[in-house]
Image: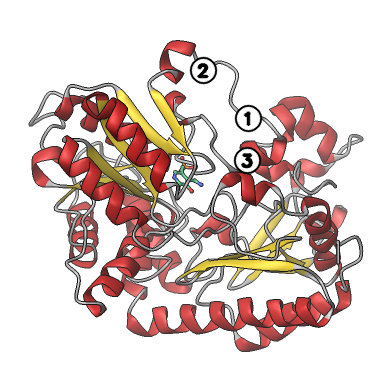
Amino acid sequence: VQRLGLRTLRGEKAWEERAADIMPGGVNSPVRAWNGVGGHPLPIASAKGATITDGAGREYLDLVDSWGAGIVGHAHPQVVAAVRAAASRGLSFGATTEAEVELAELIRERYEPAQKVRLVSTGTEATMTALRIARAATGRDVIIKFAGCYHGHSDGLLVAAGSGLATSGVPDSAGVTASVAKDTMVLPYGDVDALTDAFAEHGSRIAAVITEAVPANMGVVAPPAGFHRLVSELCRNEGAVFIVDEVLSGFRAGPAGGWGLERDADIAAGREPWTPDLVTFGKVIGGGLPVAAVAGRADLMDQLAPVGAVYQAGTLSGNPVAVAAGLTTMRLLDDDAYTHLDRISTRLRTGVSAELDAAGITHAVGHAGTLFSVFLGLDKAPVTFDEVSDQDALAYSDMFHSFRSSGIALPPSAYEAWFVSLAHTDEHVTRIVEAVKTWGGREAKQ
Ligand code: PMP
């Protein structure tokens, strides 16, 4: 621990003790505590490219990528240079900058339904604001969300919310009042009958339906063909707002996120694409610093103050240093970048799957565009959260720790996506596939 150069680690007490002493669970965000896989994470000292280095100086090939934000690889020289330059011009002004306008324009250029954009700092704020706009615009209260989809930790959305919650086995959060929870209707993802019934029964009370463009907080679930189109039609017919959460999938699943994949498929099939009314972004658009956004139809976005009556604000919204990271990251994401992400993620998911097959390990791979995850113990890619929950999470933990020994950092939960970046190479793919062979499926149900 002396080698760390982490000055805070000196002294008698182990760092875990000190962390647990001062921070609940020793972390500032629950999944970091490895409660889904067991064991004790060391603090991270640094990260570069596809590699992350812990406090003991051990290097891991990183498949977490800051939960998707690190799409161009850690500490990309151009991103770091842009951040340095922005910082030297001033850290925060509490006033609009040109770079904010550029980032918002770039988002709209690549994602047409984002007619107007408001930058915020976290995905939680983005979805919370989207709900507020929808309720204001419709004068209705009820929100429909799907079990296993996570939309941040605002009260009304913290119901049946996947990953962090699924991992710790908490079906819901304490501290959310019954009066807030009653306005959130939770349906099984992909269930056409449940959705049409809900609209038939409660249509005139529904302000919005919110879904992840690609559910990726219960592992990655490919949206069933036509499901989002149906949501869109029901919303339009009943005057509800369709909110597509692209915080994780935006500019990651493909160049125009999860929606873009469906738009391209519709166009290829000669169908008119459906369009979200509101969209939320995060992660990639901040390139590792806190930027998120709510965007969408101009008439809905103009409900926001100072134009409209929906209040929303942020001291650090559109922060110039964070926007510099996001803008540079987005500019690095050109056609070649997506070709690379597509190729590497395809090679990785098919390579890992083939190796699991060779070892006789029952598994399924959920994927949409460049997003994917591996479900051990399932023989068919799941759609609902109940189906996801049948996966063999113990085998995943075993694989996670075996991978660590092989120098590979998988997400510390069976309910998360495996994230690749521009820094991941063919050689990395080979190493990861090799790690499956080394693991060999101990503990896994055959
Ligand atoms: N929506 C989705 C789809 C997410 O994946 C996340 C974060 N994992 C959020 C919202 C919340 O974003 P944040 O953690 O920035 O509040």
- Left or right, 346 with respect to 270, comes to right
Q: Cα distance, mark 1 to mark 3?
A: 10 Å
Which of disc 1 and disc 2 is earlier in sequence?
1
- Left or right, 153 with respect to 61, comes to left
Disc 2 residue type (three-letter): Val
Identify the residue at horizontal 39%, vertical 47% (top origin): 192
**Circle 2 or circle 1, nearest the eye:** 1
Q: Nearer the viewer, residue 250 or 103?
A: 250
Q: Cα distance, mark 3 to mark 2?
A: 16 Å
Query: For residue 164, which numbered disc appears in the image?
Result: 3
Disc 3 residue type (three-letter): Gly
Residue on which disc 1 sits: 171
When the figure is inspected, residue 44 is found, relative to residue 242, above or below; the finding is below
Residue on which disc 2 sits: 176
State yes or no: discs 3 and 2 in contact (Cβ < 8 Å).
Answer: no
Which image quarter holds the C terminus? bottom right
Q: Cα distance, mark 2 to mark 1?
A: 12 Å
Identify the residue at horizontal 33%, vertical 54% (top origin): 228
- What secondary structure is marked by label 3? helix
